[in-house]
Image (spheres, rainbow, N blue to C red):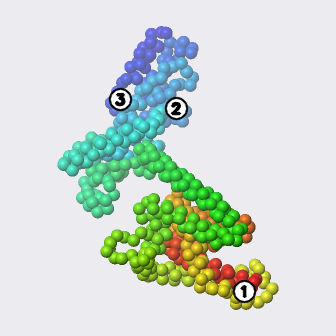
Amino acid sequence: MGGLGQEALHETVETRHRRVVDADDDVAHLPVSIDHDHHRDRAHAVPRERAAHVARHGVAHRVLREMPAQRAFGLARDPQHRQARRVMTTVHVVERRHDRATRPAPGRPEVEDDHAPAQILQRHSVTAAQALRRDRRSRLAEAERADAAAARPDALGRRGHRARGGHRDRTARSEDDERTAEDGDGVRPEARVIDHRGRLYHGRARGRPTMIERVEAMRTDGDERRKRHEVLREAALVYALVCVLTFALGALRALAPLRDVAHLGIAALFLVVPLWAARREHGGARRLGIDLAGLLEAPPDERPTRSAGPFGLFDLARAVRDAAPSGLRELGAALLVALVVFPPFVVGFYLWNQPSRGFVWSPPPDLASFALTQIVLVGLPEEALFRGYVQTRLHDAFPPRTTILGARVHVGVIVAQAALFALVHLATEPYAQKLAVFFPGLLFGWMRAWRGGIGAAILFHAMSNVLAEILVRGWLG
């Protein structure tokens, strides 16, 4: 290699460590490559007419399209000379200068991509562990800065941020301080600065989440996903066990002496499961919506001297008395829904069945006893299990996101609990007609979300069964 080539190579190596004092330095004088392929004894420098200059934003702009800014800064090899040495001239210097100019606040505001010199740099990947370690260090540093700001906020506001290239907005300082104190937005007044472009930053990235925020979001999403899987797994296991036991108890209905026992066993099973779930957490009965104004909750031990009476009848009477106002409200809600739903239901029942005779009033022999049975042995257990336990667990996994007629629900949850409600009826009696309870199950689920409990749904469920029995006996019996 000739003398000229050796001299150019020496300058190239020195340029890799040379500190650029002024960002407006002409980069045309920086040698880029040496022709090793053809062994020529001359250095190839960037032509002056193709040179890039550093604009006021610290970004390398091209004068001509065929001369990229990366080659002007020596950040890429000349494609015609692949063996040339790579010149890392001003990459770190420009990055540090840009950071000092656009990082006035501790949060390091994010700059636009088309104005960032880091766009022409190689991006470095940061692992989650490194991001968490940086987060801990930044939090400790932030606490120290907060203590220093409380002791001498003016010094931090003037010297600290000017050293980073920004200055305090003195005209709006008092207004910002008052707004921060009133709104409580969590951004310290000293973090509100104006950068060298006149834009107001609030000590954090604008528009996009930072790496730490993305890592925390991933960790939060992971926790939520794990909790969702646990809730769904519990609900699936409980429902599968209920279906198996229901099928076993339903098989006993074929035996005439055990028919009533089978009904009582299924009702007890449906009621025990939500009560068991409610005892596992504090206030579980109220959260599941099965407290019934205290009827299904343990009485508070506020008056231990009061007598419970024989078999606890006095306590039961006091609980019924305390729950009476809430029961009347739920009864009114159930009657309101019945006034809207029952007329079209009767018309649909007639059109679907096409009875051959007129309606004959033929209620069950003991209508009051039948209605009470529907409330205690049918409505209460089924609503406690499916609208109390199943629907609440599904809403724990999939929070409500839609408002339907004043009820905050998740549509998928309402549909799922109604489908599970229909399938368990199919387990008791394997007839396809049993799947029709899917549609009233949708309404029961909405009522539970609307009222915040299962009281109105129990009463409406019982009224629906009584009405269906009367229609069957009057038109088809």
Q: Position of residue 227 (x, y in %)?
A: 49, 52
Q: How many marks?
A: 3
Quarter of the image with the C terminus in it: bottom right
Q: Amino acid at mark 1?
A: Gly
Q: Look at the numbered disc 1 and give the secondary structure of its residue.
A: helix
| 78 up-or-down from 139: above or below | above
Task: State the image quarter where residue 166 is shown.
Answer: top left
Which residue is label 1 attached to?
A: 474
Q: Amino acid at mark 3?
A: Val
Residue of label 2 = 67
Q: Residue at x 47, y 63 (%)?
A: 278
Disc 1/disc 3 C-alpha distance (Å): 99 Å
Q: CA distance from mark 1 to mark 2?
A: 92 Å
Residue at which label 3 appears: 20
In the image shown, does 153 or 85 lie closer to the viewer? 153
Q: Is residue 26 visible?
A: no
Characterize the local packing of mark 1: few (<14), some (14-19) or many (20 or more) Cα atoms within 10 angstroms: some
Determine contact: label 1, label 2, CB under 8 Å.
no
**Quick check: can you spot residue 349?**
yes
Residue 235 — which label?
A: none
Rendered residue at 54%/67% (across/down): 271
Indicate the secondary structure of the residue bearing disc 3. Answer: loop
Q: Which of 276 and 22 lies nearest the eye of the viewer?
A: 276
